[in-house]
Image (cartoon, rainbow, N blue to C red):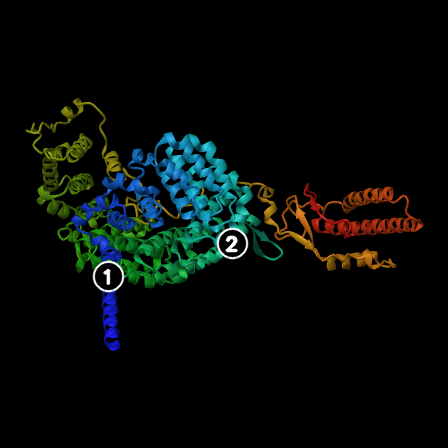
Amino acid sequence: MATGLNLNSFTENTSRLGARISESIIEHTRDLAITRSPGSYFDAPEEKVRGVRKQLDANGDREKLDALKTLIALISKGRNVSEFFPSVVKNVASQNLEIRKLVYIFLLRYAEAEPDLALLSINTFQRDLADPNPLIRAMALRVLSGINVPMVGNLVVLAVKKCAADPSPYVRKAAALALIKCYNMDTTHLSSLIPILATLLKDKSPLSIGAAAVAFQAICPARLDLLHAHFRRLCRMLLDADAWGQVSVLGLLARYARCMLTKPSATFAVEEETEREEVDPDLQLLLTSAEPLLMSRNPAVVLAVARAFFYLSPSSQLAKTVNPLLRLLPTSREVERVVLACFVVISRDAPQLLVPHYSRFFIRTTDIREVKRDKLRVLLKLLTPENHQVLLREFVVYAEDPDGQIVSEAIQAIGRCARIIPESLTQCLSAFMDFIKHGSDSAVSSSVLVLRTLVQTRLQTEPGASLTTTSAHSPLRIIADLAGRIDEIRHPSARACVIWLVGQYAALGAEDSNKPNLGDGGVSCVAWWAPDVLRRVAKTYSTEAPIVKLQLLTLAAKLQVLSSSNHHALALLTRYVFLLARYDASYDVRDRVRILSGLFIGVTPQSQHPNGDRHSDGDFSDEADVLDRGGVILRLEQVKLVLFEGKVGIRGKKEIFSGKLNRLGHGNEFEPPSSEWLEEGTESSLRDTEDEYPTLRVTAQAAQRNLSAVAGGIENLGPSHVISSSTPVALTSSGRASPGTQGKPKNKGPWMDLDKFYEDSESEDDEEDEEEDDDDDDDDGDDGDEDQSKEDETRTKSDLTANYSQVVTDETEDEDDGESSEDAYDYSHDSHSA
């Protein structure tokens, strides 16, 4: 029977336990269904989004939290969920911390777009400014400053002022960033914001100092006088600040140094036969404090330090930035793009720093176009007689790139190499001729353009080179080869260049034009090719570009002027080209032929119209009729001067490597912090502060040693005369500088006179002694003896301190080197312990 009862109770307990387990499993399953994984919020279906409003109005925190997470996920995906703003703002006063954080994140996104609805909760935001949680205080300030309504500007300024004195650096950082929003909301609050900014600049927390620097740059970038007292402290805080704070503070300090400090200078020491660099101590402090940041893992910090060194440091310290910048090149494509833009600037002003590392700038096939262009710029600046062979081979390889723009710039680099390094001229000309024979259209056109400039340069600098035709790379031979390949050159600019070269230098063989062109393929005068070029291009006149037509007209005019006799075929060909151009669709072509026809009036009228009759085009060939037209009639020599010397100098396309470089589309990140250095920097004393120097402490043992050294032979001093207090004496600075401090500022003042200090202390002792004498008038004669001994001790101490003060004053004068100052130090000291 007992066994049956036990079994029944066991069965009953088992059934109850199973029911509880089932309920627990069901409850946990429901929790799991609601508390989804973070990734599931990004894939919320539309049915779930439509139910968010209902969840926000629910009573349970679990539904609200789920709805807010869904909205934040949609915001991160770029979807506009401002329609839920009224439902979200209702939960701003929720007791759940997680819900309040998400509500504030939502409000930060849409408070500026919905200022009217955000104003409904402004009381809640102000109340949250006193919340115990610093995160809530900071987010409340961020939302409050994000309400872009000028009507609440005064409230926002008061809130920012309150948070600027918050004990949490995170809240002070939010206050600094809120200053920018206040200023953008209403610029009239500037007078109220500057004192708040001055308070934030005094902050000693590395977390908030970066935001204060950003606020300074946005609100009052010209008020650099506010930084005088904080410059040295900011320099020492660089290492402790976060990465983006370091970037902001470095930019601010670099601009201050450029505007307020003296420019480094180098002087030649005749005795040592070396150059000595004179650097301002404050500028050297900035450079020394920033140098360890070159090892930072953040590329922005390294770039900021490199920028500061490049524009602030003397030339001897620039090499420190090269290796850290080179380390950033393989980091990522984005970083490489920015770093190369900086290297372009460095190579332009200090190429000697990068010459040993030229191989780091070789182009890879996987580089994007902008990176290839920047590398070409850098390599061209690093070109020297020692490495020109290697770089020239690289340029030839780059000329085979699939990108036509890179091909054009690589060929221009080869031309630049031929001008900079005369020894490489032959090799460069051979490369150009190979490109013309076997290269692509872009390579051919670019080679012709560069050859035109090289031929001009050589003919102007070497007058005898025009008569040398035995060499395959003589200027005349190059022009002849280009003229023979006029049909193979299809680019309009390249064809125009060839036609211009043929016409411009046709006069070189005009004296020998009656001689036939003999030889094994050699050409002794370019003039033999000129009429043939005119004939071949005139056949395709209708399909030519306007730039080719213009040069064709000029070529015809030049050949007509250079012709020693009125060649009938040449005159007919010239007239044919002029007639085609007179009715051309281009205004420029019609204007050009009208100008050239006016130049030829009175020069060769019979050559234009052999019969001398009036033609359908309205021209007259009779010389008398020509004179009746009036105007200025030029002679043959004057027409030659206009055609051949009308434009003085070498005409060439502006090279991609000269001029102001627009390296980044949104602005240049490596521009100088300020335009120019000041002739003389500001006074160094403006940057002296009390917090700059550590508090000096004199221990009892040190004081005892000094007193013993001064006292010398003084004896009979009992233990009561020795400083026995173990409490250190603090020497608190009330001025600017003190002897022996680090840095040794220029203006150092003497120590306070110790005689005066101890006289004040002894007067207090005398007053106390007089009070004790009044109270003890009825004492016996032993008290009188004690008073007499005290007076003796006091007199001994007075002599001792006078000697000691004289020694200290002498030492101070030696350290100050005769300089005087208004600085003074107060020595707080217990007179009884002395």
The answer to which of marks 2 and 1 sits earlier in the sequence is: 1
Q: How many marks?
A: 2
Which residue is the site of mark 2?
Answer: 289
Left or right: 421, with 562 as reference point: right
Label 1 sits on residue: 23
Q: Nearer the viewer, mark 2 or mark 1?
A: 1
Q: Amino acid at mark 1?
A: Glu
Looking at the picture, how far across and down is residue 459, in whole percent? 30, 49
Density class for disc 1 (Cα within 10 Å; few <14, some 14-19, many ≥20) is few
Vertical relation: 35 (above or below) 549: below
Q: Position of residue 323 (x, y in %)?
A: 42, 60
- Tag on residue 745? none
Foreground: 440 or 58?
58
Q: What quarter of the picture does the N terminus occupy?
A: bottom left
Identity of the residue furthest to the left in this view: 616
Nearer to the camera, 51 or 327: 51
Q: Amino acid at mark 2?
A: Ser
Quadrant location of residue 369?
bottom left
